[in-house]
Each structure stands twice: as structure tokens, then as C-alpha cells.
Image (tube, grey):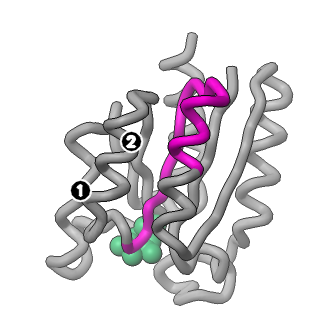
Amino acid sequence: ATILVLHGPNLNLLGTREPEIYGATTLADINLQLSERCQSAGHQLQCLQSNAEHELIDRIHSAKTEGVDFILINPAAFTHTSVAIRDALAGVEIPFIELHLSNVHSREAFRQHSYLSDIAQGVICGFGAQSYDLALSAAFSQLA
Ligand code: DQA
């Protein structure tokens, strides 16, 4: 199967960005680990990080035409703001998991609402970089 991982705004700074909240692992480390796991499981992995809402939306649209089977998305701050990303995911009808490094429910009130959670297959948050691994394991089970 083909799995697409989408990383939202500011996640390019992982490793140096508020490490007490987001950890020391870089985005390149995360993507490498995910792609190695996908490769050994016989799946294809594609990754995109963007700070621009429209790029994430365009990538979700092209996922449909490319036949992407499953999406893992850390929408970052767009989680709490973007009706447009919600509509894109609903529009392509590709199953997805929402994930976060931090436990958004233990943080500021504005992080406790997500525009995506109710249409996601599931939501994983609070395990740092391991949230991505847990999400990938869940995706493998969903695809099996
Ligand atoms: C985040 C949580 C969001 O609230 C925040 O805006 C981010 C990262 C996380 O992975 O913990 O940028 O999605």
C-alpha cells in the first residue's frame, strides 16, 4: 500500500523548536524511521512537510488521483484552525490518522479543539516522536 505522511507548519524546526515540548528528534530522523519501517513491511511511504495550508491541501487532492491508501497527518497549528484541511480530507475520502507529538489536551485551551478528530480513523498524541511510530503501526493494522 501507499502511505502519505503530512507534517504541518513549523515541524521543519523539530529538534530545535521548543525541545522541552517537542523533543530532540528531527523531522528527517522521523521520516527516515517511518520509511525504513514501511520498506520492510512492503509498503511505500511518501512525506511532505509544508508551512503553507494550500500546499497540504493540494497534496491531499493529488493523493486521491495517485491512489494513496492511507494518510498520517500531524496538522500542527492547522489542527486548530483549518476547516479547509478538514474539507480536503473529507473530500478525498482517504482514511487518515491525526497525530501530535505533544499531548494537546494538557496544554492551552486553544489546542484542545481539532477540526479533524471527528472524521479521523483515530487520534494519537502525547508520545513525542513515538506518536508517529504508533500511528504507523495503527495504519498497518487498518490496511491489513
Ligand atoms: C502539534 C501540537 C499543535 O498544537 C502545535 O501547533 C504544533 C505541533 C504537536 O505535534 O504536538 O505545531 O501538532
The residue positioned 51% from the left and 85% from the top of the image is 20
Residue under the image location 59 percent in, 60 percent down: 129
Q: Which span is picked out in magenta?
A: 59-77
| Total numbered badges shown on the rendered structure | 2
Q: Is residue 96 left or right of residue 87?
A: right
Q: Is mark 2 within 8 Å of ligand 1?
A: no
Residue 105 rendering spot, x and y as whole percentages? 23, 65
Answer left or right for 111 relative to 76. left
Query: Toward which corner of the image does residue 122 lie, by quadrant?
Result: top left
Q: Position of residue 11 (x, y in %)?
A: 58, 73
**Which of the 4 image quarters holds residue 107?**
bottom left
SS for dot 1: loop
Please give left or right for residue 78 compared with residue 38 in the image: left
Q: State the residue position of label 1.
A: 115
Asked whether residue 74 is drawn in magenta, I would say yes
Based on the picture, tell me whether residue 48 belongs to the magenta stretch: no
The residue type indicated by label 2 comes to: Leu
**Residue 120 position (above or below residue 101):** above
Quarter of the figure with the C terminus: top right
Where is 129 relative to 117, above or below?
A: below
Q: Tag 2, which secondary structure?
A: helix
Point 30% across, 64% down: residue: 82
14 up-or-down from 7: above or below: below
Residue under label 2:
89
Closer to the camera in the image, 126 or 99: 99
**Residue at coordinates 56% horizontally, 75% vertically from top-left?**
51
Task: Classify the position of the N terminus by image quarter.
Answer: top right
What is the x, y in percent for residue 68?
A: 61, 29
